[in-house]
Image (cartoon, grey):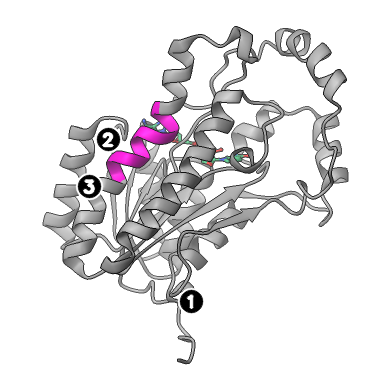
Amino acid sequence: MPKPMYSGIEGKVALVTGGGRGLGKAICLALAREGADIALTDLQAADETAREIEALGKKAMAFSADVTKEAEVKEMVDRIVAEWGGIDILVNNVGGDHAFLLEDLPVSEWDWMMDINMKGLFHCTKIVSEVMKKRGGGKIVNISSLAGLRMTLYGSIAYSAAKAGVIGFTRHCAFELGPAKINVNAVCPGPTMTEVVLSRISPEVKKRTLQSTPLQDFTYPEDQADAVVFLASERARMVTGTTLLVDGGISLPVGFVEWDEFYSSRKQWLKEKKWEGKKTSM
Ligand SMILES: NC(=O)c1ccc[n+]([C@@H]2O[C@H](COP(=O)([O-])OP(=O)(O)OC[C@H]3O[C@@H](n4cnc5c(N)ncnc54)[C@H](O)[C@@H]3O)[C@@H](O)[C@H]2O)c1
């Protein structure tokens, strides 16, 4: 069968979670440029992204639904279906990180991590996949992380566990939803230069990131959005249950972490940076 020469996104309805800033915003704009109308939810700045989508000539619907709350997700999805007839593309982008060593990690922070990275993904996928089944198919793209495949340097053990969970969830959903013609895939971003990341890292870390990246450039939110567009498109017709790593090759070298140095200095380092327990998301 010849490959379609079109992305197939024109005229589709997409729902993007965490679309107010960072990767989510870049994903909203990239899908809109491909011709989709975009519904998005975020606890902040959803309206600003909606205005930028409309400036691209596409329809936008902004919500402030908290994806960890099932009732709020249901209400949002019902409204999208009532007004736009259904949902063809779901991008589960909401996620967050914080930094703790295992011995200092309170159970409340473990729960927060699982909620923000996995519970919202579960609610949205469960509810939206039923809408997609009625529509005859769809595409779901989950944002995991390089930390889900390896480990995380600046974040926590709980983040790595949650993002690995996203990959497991993706595989299983792909199997269950395949017969309903719903593709389910994950993107694993490496360190990506969002405004938040840029505001947190020092010039020294920035330089080191560049030096450690075989492709000798930074990875930007737009690079992650391009991967999402591919997986949400008809070009990825027969791609399901996979993970697409977008990291410029930074994870290729073996022995990236100096074990002794990491454990002996990290606790002190987190304290000095005042990063211990600091959340990167709401
Ligand atoms: N930036 C990176 O370097 C990087 C690397 C790997 C993976 N990721 C993953 O990519 C995704 C996006 O990352 P980012 O850096 O753009 O994050 P970000 O924190 O800049 O943006 C996340 C957005 O989600 C929103 N949000 C948080 N909780 C929410 C909730 N319960 N309901 C609705 N909205 C909520 C926040 O308000 C925020 O606008 C996350 O899943 C993150 O783990 C990012």
Which element carries disc 3, helix, strand or loop? helix
Disc 3 or 1, which lies upstream in sequence?
A: 3
On whether ligand 1 comes within 8 Å of the CB at mark 1, the answer is no
> In this view, which residue lies farthest toward the bottom?
2
Image height of 195 relative to 213, above or below:
above
Disc 2 or 1, which lies upstream in sequence?
A: 2
Is mark 3 in CB contact (under 8 Å) with mark 2? no
Which element carries disc 2, helix, strand or loop? loop
Write down the residue under mark 2: 65
Decide if residue 64 is on the left or right side of residue 155: left
Give the residue type that dot 3 points to.
Answer: Ile
Magenta run includes residue 122: yes
Give the residue type that dot 1 points to.
Answer: Arg
Which element carries disc 1, helix, strand or loop? helix
On whether ligand 1 comes within 8 Å of the CB at mark 2, the answer is yes
Quadrant containing the C terminus is: top left
Write down the residue under mark 1: 235
Q: Where residue 226 appears, x then y in whole percent?
A: 56, 62
Predominant SS along the magenta part: helix
Image height of 18 relative to 282, above or below:
below
Quadrant assignment, res 108: top left
Q: Where residue 222 appears, x then y in whole percent?
A: 59, 55
Label 3, label 2: how many angstroms apart (C-alpha)?
A: 14 Å
| Residue 127: mark | 3
Magenta segment boundaries in residue numbering: 115-124
